[in-house]
Image (cartoon, rainbow, N blue to C red):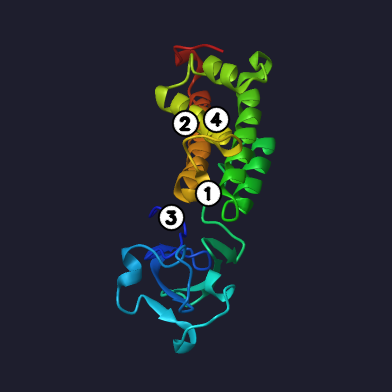
Amino acid sequence: MPKAITPIPLGHSYTCPYCDTTAVIRWYGVQQASSVIISGNDAEEPGFYTWAGGHATSNAELSNWAFAECTNCGHMTVWRKDRMVYPKCTTVDDPNQDMPGEVKDCYLEAAHVLNDSPRSAAALLRLGLQHLLSYLLGEAASGNLYRDITEYSKTAPMQITKALDTIRLAGNESVHPGEIDLNEDPEYASFLFVLMNMICEESISRPKELEEAYQKLPKSKRIISD
């Protein structure tokens, strides 16, 4: 399955929230569009950006708006400055089918606010990670995210430890001044959803599938007895 591309302002192509297809995007706006919208090499391409009405406008608010047409389905998305304001949807993957309920609630709430506030999405995923580690560690969970990641990493593969720590740190950066501005890097925020699903896949789904397959083998011939 092709990788979804998160919609970004003046992106040449991204995954359409209507038809779920990655397609070329045609942009429309007003002549005095703000520098936030008119930026990058794509905006210089002939025909890439069409001026609404064909003349300048003195309305400062109009300069904040842009409209993007998917060349695959023809539907329009509406942008104000650097945010998609319509439709209210996201292109992140569905939560892993084995994701615990409290974690899934945080994941879906984060997906709902991702386009409006990547920082809020990261903070919600960090909360979901706390619930997930509580589920994975059981009584050994301390409630302190750093200590719980350290504890779980004793038996987890290195890539899972890195995924856990990435979500933890990105969540911290979202509420404290730091080196990462997630509102300026929505692709990074979107990747946190990929990591959350990967953690659930490797820590819950795969062990579950392996156990189901092993239980089908004759007990008398297994190396590991119940």
Residue that label 4 marks: 168
- From what the image shows, is residue 160 above or below residue 110? above
Q: Give me the residue at 52% from left, 25% from top.
A: 211
- Image quarter of residue 125: top right
Crowd band around label 2 with a 10 angstrom C-alpha radius: few (<14), some (14–19), many (20+) = some
Front position among marks 4 and 1: 1
Q: Which mark is residue 183?
A: 1
Q: Is residue 56 left or right of residue 99?
A: left
**Position in image of residue 153 (x %, y %):** 49, 18
Q: Give me the residue at 47% from left, 31% from top.
A: 163
Tell me the distance, in whole angstroms, between the alpha carbons under discs 1 and 2: 20 Å
Tell me the distance, in whole angstroms, between the alpha carbons under discs 2 and 4: 9 Å
Identify which amino acid the numbered label 1 is placed on: Asn
**Position in image of residue 86 (x %, y %):** 60, 67
Tell me the distance, in whole angstroms, between the alpha carbons under discs 4 and 3: 23 Å
For label 4, the SS is helix
Crowd band around label 3 with a 10 angstrom C-alpha radius: few (<14), some (14–19), many (20+) = some
Tell me the distance, in whole angstroms, between the alpha carbons under discs 4 and 1: 17 Å
Front position among marks 1 and 3: 1
**Position in image of residue 99 (x %, y %):** 60, 37
Residue that label 2 marks: 163
- Image quarter of residue 83: bottom right
Tell me the distance, in whole angstroms, between the alpha carbons under discs 1 and 3: 19 Å
* Comes first in the chain, label 1 or label 3: 3
- The answer to which of 122 and 151 lies nearer the viewer is 122
